[in-house]
Structures are given as C-alpha cells and as structure tokens.
Image (spheres, coloured by chain):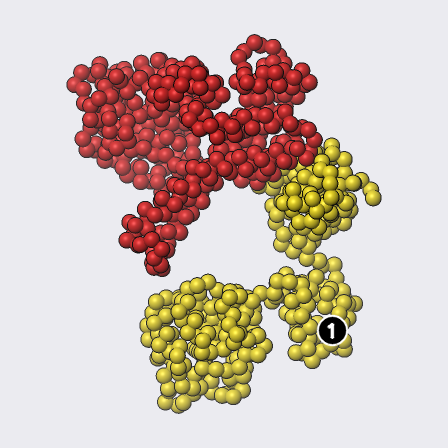
Chain colours: A yellow, B red
Amino acid sequence: MAKAASSTALSWRDVTPAPIVLLSGPEEYFAQRARDLLRKQLRAAHPDLEVTSFDAGEYAPGSLALASSPSLFGEYKLLEVSRLEAMNDAFLTDALALAGSGAEDTVILLRHAGGTRGKKLLDTVKAAWPVVDCQPLKKDTDKNAFVSAEFRAGGRRIEGPAVLALVQAVGSQTAELAAACQQLMEDTSGAVTAETVEQYYGGRVEASAFKVADKALDGDAAGALATLRHALATGADPVPLVAALAAKLRTLARVAGSRGSAAQLARDLGMQPWLVEQAQRDIRRWTPERLRICIRAVAEADAQVKGLSRDPVYAVERIVHLVATSVSAR
Amino acid sequence: MSVFDELRGQDAVAAQLRRAAAGEGMTHAWLFTGPPGSGRSNAAKAFAAALNCEQPDPALRGCGECHACRTIVGETHPDVQHVRTDKVTIAIDEARELVATAGNHPSSGRWRIIIVEDADRMAERTTNVLLKAIEEPTARTVWMLCAPSPADVLVTIRSRCRSVALRLPSAEDVAELLVRRDGVEPALAASAARLAQSHVGIARRLARDAGARERRLETVRFPLGLKGITSAVLMAERLMSIAGDEADSSNTERDAAERQALLSSLGLEDGAPIPPALRGQLKRLEEDQKRRAKRSITDSLDRTLTDLISFYRDVLLLQVGTGESLVNEELRSELEGFAAAGTPETTLARIDAINLTRRRLVTSNVAPLLALEGMAAGLV
C-alpha cells in the first residue's frame, strides 16, 4: 500500500491524538505499538477515558453514533475499530457520515491492514486526518535502523556490530526483534555490545534457503549442513531449499558450455551480468559429469520433498551434502 | 449410415454394443477402456445413441438419422449427460450432483445415460460417492465410464461394471478416418496417423496444423543435439516453452470469451466497474481457468514426452533389428547413426527415465522445469 501512504503519513512513533486516526498497512506489530502509545497519551490527559472496541466486519448499524455521542458524565472516549479491510456495508455508511467531522470528545482509531475494501472511506479519512503507515521491515538496513531507534527511545546505547548481530539472529519477525531489544534493555546495563548479543542470542542464526545453497556451492559441506539445520529450525521449508539449489545449478549448467564475455552471455541467456560472472567463477570448480549427476539428483530430491520420500528433511540433507562434496577444492 | 461407423477397427466392440442395444446382454454400468485415442468416449456416445434410438426394429438401432441419434451425437439430448473435466480432477460436488441426476426417470428416451469421460480423473473419495449409485441405479439409468485401463478405476467400481475393451486402431484405419471425416489429403493423413502413433485426436491436429508438426519435429530431434549438460538444460527449457505455447494457444482465447460471456450474463457492460457482490463470481471463473491452465500444460508436456519416447523407441527397434516400421521414418538416417552409437540397454534406461518423468509430472506436483532438467540430464 505504498501508494496509499499520502504526504500526511506518520511513523507510528509520532502518533498523537486527533478526532480520527487511521493505522494503515500490513504490519500488525506497528499498529499495536501505535495503539498502545495513543491509549497511553489519552489516559494521561483524561483519566476517565472510556475505550470501546468494534470489529468492522461484524458491525451493527448505529453503534458508532451510539458510542460517540456525548454522555451524561462527559467522559472522553476512544473508539478502536479493527479489521477495516473486512468492513461491512453498515460500517461504511456510518463511518462515512462521521469521517468529515469526527465526534466531540472522541478519538476514533481505525485499523486497516491493506487491500482496497472501503476505498472511499479510506480516501476521505486520508484527506482530512493523520495516517500512520504500518509497513513491514523488509531490508536489513530498515531493521538496523529500527533497532537503533528502539534503543534511542529507551535512552540506551547499542554498538554498530551488536545491531548487526541482533538483526541476523532474530530479524525475521518485527515483534520478535522488538522483544529482543526490550529484553536486552531490561536485563543489561551500560552500552550493549556484540558480546552481550552473543551471550543472549548466540548460536541462533536465521538462514534463508539461498544462504544454504550458497554454502553448498562453496564446497563447504559441514557449513552447508549446519546452515541447513539453522534454516530448518527457524522455519524454512524443504521445498524452497531444493528450489534454491536447483536455480543455482541451472545457472551453472547454462553458463558451463558457453564461451564469451559475461556481458555477452548475460544478454544471450537473459540473466543478470553479476550472476553470470559469479557462475563463471564457480564453474571452474565443477566437472560436467558431476554437474550432470547433481542436476539429476536435485530433480529426484524435488520429487522426494513433495511426497515421494517419507522424510523430506533427510532428502534435502542428502542433496545438500552431495552438491557440497561435488565441488572441487579451490 | 450407423453411429457405429465411427468406430474404426473396433469390430468386436461394435458387435457387442449392437447386441446390447438390441436387448441382449444389457446391463446398468459399462466401463470403456482403451489407450488414449482409441475412441473410448466415441464408443460410449455411439452406444448411448443406439440405446435411445427411435427405430422400432431393435436390429436397426443406432441408425444415426433419427432425432435421438443426432442429438446424442451432438451432445444435446436431455437424457444423456456427458461428464468431462478440463481441470486436473472431477470435483466431489460434481459427483454428488450426478448421483442426484441418476435418480431421475428419463424424460423422452428409453434410458437416462450418464457418460463419465474422465473416470480416471477422480480422487478415491469422489469415486466412493458414485459407488452406491452405480451399484444399484434406478431401473432406467445406465452409467458409462471411460478410462485408459481398468486399473485406473477403483476396484470396487470396476467389479460393478461390464468391461468394453477397445484396442488401438491401426495407423491405416486412423488415416482412412482422417481422409473420410476431415477431408485430409491421403499422403498427409498417412504420415500424421503414423507420427501420432494412431492417436486419432493428435493425428487430426498434426494433419491440420503445420505449427504442431513443426513443434513435434523439433521435439523428436532434441536427442540428436544432446551433447553435454548445457544442451540438456537448454533442451528442458525449450520443451517447457513448447508446452507452454501449445497450452496458451488453446487457452487465451477461450478464457477471454468465457469472461466476456460471464460479464454479459451478469448484465455488465464492457469495461464497467464490477460491483463487489459480483466479484466472487469472477474470481471463481479465474480460479477455474487457472486450474485448467495447469492441466493443459501438464497435458501438453505429456504429449511432448510421448513424442520424445517415439524417438528412442525407433532407436531401440533399429538396435535390436526387429524390422518393425519406424514412427519417425523421416529421420531414418539420423536414427540409424544414433542407434549404432549406443546399446539397447542404455536406450531402454533412457525410455524409463522419460516415462518416470511423465508419471511424476502427471501424478505429483514436482516443478516441471526441474523434472525436465533431471530427465534431460539422464538422457545425455
């Protein structure tokens, strides 16, 4: 929903009360943080705050007006509406009526996880009220920045290498990464160093399928098997592992029999030049016969992880070992 | 003119079905088996026409001229239901509907007939739904199941059906049919029938479509250029794109037409926004089309690999010197050179490798390109 993030889009750290606040984007963790922050600010300002929650998918007509109308004792009100991505028509009608002006003494917090449902409402809200952009962290640099910001917000210092180590160990899920930051801040004192991270999260590595394939094609059998175990333990599936190996071997085979410069080959084969260069470096450590055997075995392993074998993990282990031992020493 | 005329080279079967239509040896469930292209569904259709034919004399039933015969052959008769799928399997809900239909009395003909053309494309669970209905149908209902071989149908179904085994027609019979029915030139018909290895549908496509002939020739020539692992990987890629082209050429137009038909039946103008309440229907259509596309790629890969096997079959025949006629007669000199360079054992192993890949592509969800690469690596 990058397109939907208008110029008024805020980071969840900067959220402040407004008659209507929209939390838009797929990352639930950031939405939760923004919600907590908003509640804290409102509770501090209005100790008698009344919080009401709705599910926009099971909304009954009129509830919004009922909950936002001024009460006898004049409490300040926070209406939290979740699942706007599944909103029903009754909600759309009621919310559109409120979207222009908001309600007196009320903050309406809308949570939309993505998609185009209720576009008209979203556009109206976005034009008039603050929008908090809840995008997931994709790149490692984003994750590093997030860790640094967490520590800054907690008034603590973390060293550069420690940030990298932390992201590598627990970086795949934002909530987990944030919890790890929290734990480090609460359990330690002084600046957090790489040693501290190693002490808490050492031995845990989140490996992707391609990391395993890279190790295997590097001829590092022990390293590849260890990485494979890390990958499996942190949630990788055998099927993409085999697919990653197959993709690497395919590139090698396509480059193997061709002569010419990397740029020329890249054009002929429709591949990225740096990929071709890497393959040309790697191919010197292969014989055609070994490559042939490995490609047959990978095809066999693909069938095995898809139901031919009773133990898919063993099938992957075997093929990773076979590929790693087929590479000649440098 | 009789509906049984279409069954070339299946005299025994035609005689059996004629007798049954005349009332001798009739039963409520039939299983038509035979290799692809032998005309299983046509045999079932002809039999259905003969059963509901309006001729008063039982010996003349299946005239091919009365209203019932013509509507049954044209698949528009109200009492004859054709069940086929262009997806990977027949869904269990479709089977449940069939059971309900099977309970109805025929509306105009003598028999209510249900022809299941892809009886092999049913999960075991789905077949079990039909079990009771096939075992004890109402008095006026006949089931006709078609499958490549009796082993493709659950044993409990098989035991409830009378078997009709069709044999593969000879290439001459197929060529004659092409000349007579489709007006193909005799020489072209003969070569198409030989190249299609007597598969009627494929022979017709080869005879009519020069592009299909070219693609086939490219496929069977692959082993000649197979030298080293690079050519094997490139061959796999090319085979994949040939199969994709073939599937696309038949699907793209049909998909667009179906979408158009759905939109107009929903009362929407071209390019008009689709109201949210109707999006579900469109989505269902798209999902169906996606499933069909997957099936048609698998099908055309299967055909491509069959063509590839014909190359090695010819090589094997030359190596063991049986004197049988070659499928790829045009490539005789290349085939002889290839045969002299190898042994029958390696040729057999290669045929096995192709067959293994074919089976995996159809029965499991292996990555097609990778499976082809593994196969090609085995052919080097």
Is residue B20 visible in the rendered structure shown here? no
Please name the residue that numbered disc 1 is placed on: A158
Label 1 is found on which chain of the structure? A
Query: Residue at 39% of width from left, 45% of height from top?
Result: B256
Coordinates of residue A328 in the picture (x, y in percent): 80, 40
- Dividing the picture into quarters, in which one does residue B235 lie? top right
Query: Residue at 47% of width from left, 18% of height from top?
Result: B191
- Dividing the picture into quarters, in which one does residue B130 lie? top left
Q: On the picture, is B186 further left or further right than A269?
A: left
Q: Which amino acid type is marked by label 1? A: Ile
Going by the picture, which residue comes out furthest to the right? A330
Element class at badge 1: loop
Q: Nearer the viewer, residue A42 or B274?
A: B274
Query: Residue at 31% of width from left, 54% of height from top?
Result: B269
Q: On the picture, is A87 further left or further right than A247?
A: left
Q: Nearer the viewer, residue B7 or B264?
A: B264
